[in-house]
Image (cartoon, rainbow, N blue to C red):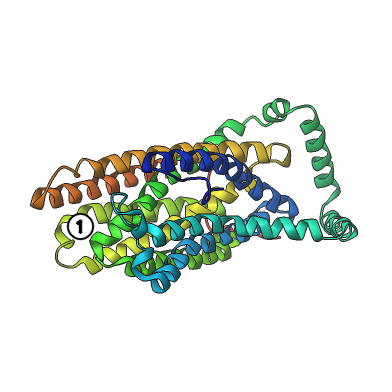
Amino acid sequence: ADGIVPWGSKASTYCLLIAVRTFIGVGAGGVYPLSAAKAAEDSAAVDPVHKSVSVAWAFLWRNFGAIAPWSWALVFYYTCGEYADMEPWSAPPASRVGSQFAWRFILMFGAVAPAVVGVFMHLQPKEVAVKEQKRLSRWTTSRVSRAEAAGHRKASATASAGLWEAVKSEPLVWRKLLGTGGGWFFFDWSFYGNHLLQGKILGLILPGDTAADAWENISLDIVGIFVVLFAIQLFPWAGVRWLQFWGFFSGGVCCLLIGLLWPALIDNTSGILLVIYYIQYGSYWIPNTTTYVMSALVYKPSIRGTLNGLSAAAGKVGAIIGVTAFTKMFEVCDDKTGDDHQQCINDAVQRVMFTSFAAACGGMFCTIYGVGLEPTGAKNKK
């Protein structure tokens, strides 16, 4: 529907696209936090840290999804050529045939993975699903002590008494929610605000055509894959909370450096800015992973899904604020020309980076105060 329904004039196309994507957002917004809770519950591990590792492996696939649109953009660019480039709406409809097909196909491609999962779930024999569920149940039970099992039974009884009772039974739950929701809020503020402007900033640092832009964005997402894999290996050793703190710290330092060095380096040694920008983007994927898995670590099962959903909702609020604010910072430059326009763009980049630095500081505070940090130097043991 995302690629088929929007049609007509520019105004009607955007209105229909917004309407369709609203429904997609409701579905994806619900599945996103629930997938973390499900990955934690499906894990055979008992201790929270190793449950978090299982959740992080589920999160890793998000990176490959981020690469897919850019990969398809390259396919259309190299096959359809200039007809796959986005033509202005003022151009004749005939010249926009390739463009119309390209963006519609890329949007519709998002339905492939859910369709495949749905088909396999439907075709899976019922007895196989039941057998697998029993196997996981026996696997988990064999690793749970009597005290832990009693705790799980108590949690289940609490859940049946209602969510509010479950929340009240855990006195520090609102402080934890500040840690998970507040951290997610500040992260998404900075990440999605910068992610929307990623192509613009890369274009300023390393100008190029459509293909070059696509390759640059793919390379950034590949960096994210390696960072997530590295973070997963560090979970049992450094701790999820410490990783989230250092992820905010390193990302904030990179934003501060880009903001301070941008005027001096953008016209001369932009390669240095490019390296810092790649490090900044790689740093983003540490808190991007930890905010996703933190709820599996700090909340008990009876309230995990709900409070993870609230934390994710706080993140989306931060994303809306970041995207809106950062976009407005660049829009003020639209009416300027020549050197004034370039100076305005440079000032906007600095404002974005300094604001992102402030958001990183907010994320560090929420992490320390809300969920705390693991004892320094203490390694996790099974």
Q: Residue drawn at (79%, 56%), measured in percent from left and top?
A: 122
Residue at 63 percent across and 59 percent down: it is 113
Foreground of the two, 109 or 192: 109
Q: Give the x, y percent position of residue 256.
A: 28, 52
**Residue shown at 80% from the left, 41% from the top:** 151
Looking at the rendered image, the quarter that the C terminus falls into is bottom right
| Viewer-closest of 377 and 107 | 107
Along the line of sight, the residue nearer the viewer: 325 or 353:
325
Answer above or below: position of 189 versus 260: above
In this image, 298 relative to 66: left or right? right
Badge 1 is on which residue? 261
Query: Please, which residue is most extreme toward the bottom here?
Result: 78
The answer to which image quadrant residue 168 occupies is top right
How far across and down, in percent of the image, does residue 150 sit? 84, 41
User: What's under tag 1, amino acid-wise?
Assistant: Leu
Measured as percent of width and height from the top left, residue 96 is found at 36, 57
Q: Position of residue 235 (x, y in %)?
A: 58, 59
